Image (tube, rainbow, N blue to C red):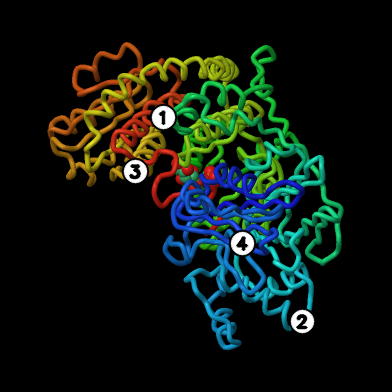
């Protein structure tokens, strides 16, 4: 969702804000704006388009000043245009916002009746008028006016406000939307939606908590007020992200770089956890909850999008190895369904960003009903990581491309480790099989390296099907979630309609779509349902569909019937998702590039979905 950045200190704010916005652009990129406080008072510039468009927009008009705020938008209320772009202004105040103000309509009516006029269609503009109104009528300072205004607000927000009358000050507040504050060595203060714009300036950060208000003051430093409006000592943490991880490192796109990082990110997610010498798995982050997992009568897995697909692989893993029934839920449905949750349920919440609003709300609901919540998150210190009872980080490193790739394989790696560990403790997996799977899991990074070598062939196939209007993805068992994920990758970055289906389910409907135009991607690796999948391929071919199959190295049967095959090394069924998804990621990437799509910032999407 929208990206927020702020700075107050001794340096010029504009370059800091612009480079911060560029780092945050993956969160939203339909319009951008800044407000700078300097010798010319409060200067606001904003426009439709990307951060580079904003730079062009202010070209030749110096934005001088040592405090300011910047915003890159993902539209909720009102189309992307110059007027709806943030910051929004009321008198001396300028404000940026990430989130949704649910009761903006009655607030707007009230403000209009009090003489305020609105220029945008956004929900955000009510906030800035509301704060200005309180400041004017109550005579309160900026921080207190923000606090009082937010008492009238229903919704989710991270906001930052500046005041022309007080040019050394930023006031920020958060509820269900992240904000991180950076503290520079020379007293400079930074603020952003996540740590990515801060890391090049300082490694000392403070993660704001829900309900808190932060005052970033050039003179007096950082002050934080908690929900009871009491000053609290900010808890400073050290950032561990490396700056290089935020750069493309010679790749044309972040997505391609991240696909290629998978051997390393899978290895990092297993490091210190999969212990081949001792023949065991140790997950330090959930150690205290291990016995609860072993005793669980049921596991619920919640997530959205790609994380939900990883959760589906988790379902197969936990059922096979730990013999625990699993339900995988879309967080957005789960939270509004009045689901049955028992105190001895384990809820596994999966999220790359750790900020997804629906997943956070599902966690809150399950927590409130007494369940134990285990997180699988990629972003250290994220809201979900902090809301769960325990969890394991995926260690995939920052994922910047909007389409999730390395986060998926890292999530599946973690779920595999968890399921095998619980299975071993419960005795539901045979010792020799457990050891064999540990060996196989350890070999996965090298096998992913090998799969990446198919890129030229995948690109050749992408060129053949780049103009397809529809595509079908089929898989069975562990490969069914991979089919869903393959279809999601294609549709989100190349805008080709694609569906994932369990291969056998095809004959119950989607088979009607198959003709000589329709590419059908089938995961047909050796394993439990191999023969059945071969029959499904025959059914497609009998209707003249084009089959592109992912097969196990050396396969001859499918090679004889499919139009194209892409080979992956042999592995156990349970580990196939970690290999089979890689050529599908590469295929989507190349199709999107060939179609001229913006791979890293696909239309309408944003990374980190902090609105419901
Ligand atoms: C797909 C994608 C999204 C996310 C979903 C959940 O490529 O990126 O579907 O997987 O928005 O996001 P997280 O994992 O951050 O909770």
Q: CA distance from mark 4 to mark 1?
A: 48 Å
Question: Where's residue 374, x and y in %?
Answer: 65, 43
Q: Is 144 drawn above or below residue 75 in the view shown?
A: below
Along the horizontal axis of the image, is 156 left or right of 259?
A: right
Along the horizontal axis of the image, is 237 left or right of 597?
A: right
Q: Which residue is mark 3?
A: 491
Q: Nearer the viewer, residue 244 or 91?
A: 91
Residue reaching furthest to the front: 60
Q: Nearer the viewer, mark 4 or mark 1?
A: 4
Element class at badge 1: helix
**Number of numbered discs overlaid on the protein picture:** 4
Q: Badge 1, how many Cα within 10 Å: few under 14, some, many 20+?
A: many
Q: CA distance from mark 2 to mark 3?
A: 52 Å
Q: Earlier in the sequence, mark 2 or mark 3?
A: 2
Q: Which residue is mark 2?
A: 138
Q: Badge 2, how many Cα within 10 Å: few under 14, some, many 20+?
A: few
At horizontal 26% and vertical 27% (from top left) the residue drawn is 548
Q: CA distance from mark 1 to mark 3?
A: 15 Å
Question: Where's residue 399, x and y in %?
Answer: 54, 36
Checking the image for residue 581, the label placed there is 1
Q: Nearer the viewer, residue 611 or 19?
A: 19
At horizontal 48% and vertical 62% (from top left) the residue drawn is 76
Q: Which residue is mark 4?
A: 43
Question: Where's residue 16, x and y in %?
Answer: 64, 45
């Amino acid at each position: 969702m929208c990206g927020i950045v702020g700075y107050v200190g001794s340096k010029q704010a504009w370059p800091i804000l612009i480079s911060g916005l560029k780092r945050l652009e993956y969160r939203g990129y339909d319009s951008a704006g800044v407000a700078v406080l300097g010798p010319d008072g409060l200067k606001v510039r904003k426009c439709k388009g990307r951060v580079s468009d904003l730079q062009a927009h202010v070209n030749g008009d110096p934005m001088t000043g040592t405090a300011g705020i910047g915003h890159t938008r993902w539209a909720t209320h009102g189309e992307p245009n110059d007027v709806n772009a943030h910051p929004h202004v009321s008198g001396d105040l300028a404000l940026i916002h990430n989130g949704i103000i649910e009761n903006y309509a009655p607030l707007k009516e009230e403000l209009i009746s009090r003489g305020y006029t609105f220029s945008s269609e956004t929900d955000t503009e009510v906030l800035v008028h509301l704060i200005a109104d309180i400041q004017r009528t109550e005579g309160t300072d900026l921080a207190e006016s923000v606090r009082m205004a937010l008492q009238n607000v229903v919704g989710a927000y991270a906001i930052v406000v500046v005041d022309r009358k007080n040019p050394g000050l930023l006031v920020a507040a958060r509820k269900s939307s992240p904000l991180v504050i950076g503290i520079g060595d020379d007293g400079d203060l930074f603020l952003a939606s996540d740590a990515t714009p801060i890391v090049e300036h300082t490694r000392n950060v403070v993660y704001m908590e829900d309900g808190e208000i932060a005052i970033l003051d050039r003179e007096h430093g950082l002050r934080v007020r908690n929900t009871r409006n009491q000053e609290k000592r900010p808890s400073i943490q050290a950032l561990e992200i490396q700056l290089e991880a935020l750069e493309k490192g010679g790749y044309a796109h972040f997505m391609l770089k991240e696909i290629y990082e998978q051997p390393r990110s899978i290895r990092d997610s297993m490091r210190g956890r999969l212990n081949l010498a001792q023949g065991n798995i140790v997950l330090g982050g959930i150690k205290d909850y291990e016995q609860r997992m072993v005793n669980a009568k049921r596991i619920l897995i919640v997530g959205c999008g790609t994380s939900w697909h990883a959760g589906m692989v988790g379902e197969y893993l936990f059922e096979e190895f730990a013999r625990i029934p699993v339900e995988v839920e879309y967080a957005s449905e789960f939270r509004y369904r009045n689901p049955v949750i028992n105190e001895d349920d384990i809820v596994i919440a999966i999220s790359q960003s750790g900020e997804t609003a629906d997943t956070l709300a599902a966690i809150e609901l399950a927590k409130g009903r007494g369940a134990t919540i285990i997180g699988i998150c990629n972003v250290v210190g994220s809201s979900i990581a902090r809301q769960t009872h325990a969890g394991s980080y995926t260690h995939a490193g920052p994922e910047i491309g909007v389409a999730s790739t390395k986060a998926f394989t890292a999530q599946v790696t973690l779920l595999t480790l968890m399921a095998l560990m619980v299975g071993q403790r419960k005795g539901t997996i045979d010792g020799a099989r457990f050891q064999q799977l540990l060996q196989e899991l350890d070999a996965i990074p090298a096998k992913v390296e090998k799969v990446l070598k198919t890129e030229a062939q995948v690109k050749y196939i992408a060129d053949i099907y780049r103009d397809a209007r529809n595509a079908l993805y089929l898989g069975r068992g562990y490969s069914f979630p991979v089919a869903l994920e393959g279809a999601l990758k294609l549709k989100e970055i190349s805008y080709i309609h694609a569906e994932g289906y369990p291969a056998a389910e095809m004959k119950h409907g989607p088979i009607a779509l198959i003709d000589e135009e329709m590419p059908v991607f089938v995961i047909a690796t050796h394993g439990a349902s191999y023969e059945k999948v071969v029959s499904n391929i025959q059914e497609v071919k009998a209707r003249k569909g084009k089959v592109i199959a992912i097969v196990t190295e050396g396969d001859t049967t499918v090679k004889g019937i499919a139009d194209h095959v892409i080979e992956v090394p042999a592995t156990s069924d349970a580990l196939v998702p970690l290999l089979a998804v890689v050529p599908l990621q590469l295929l989507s990437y190349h199709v999107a590039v060939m179609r001229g799509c913006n791979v890293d910032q696909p239309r309408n999407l944003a990374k980190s979905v902090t609105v419901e």
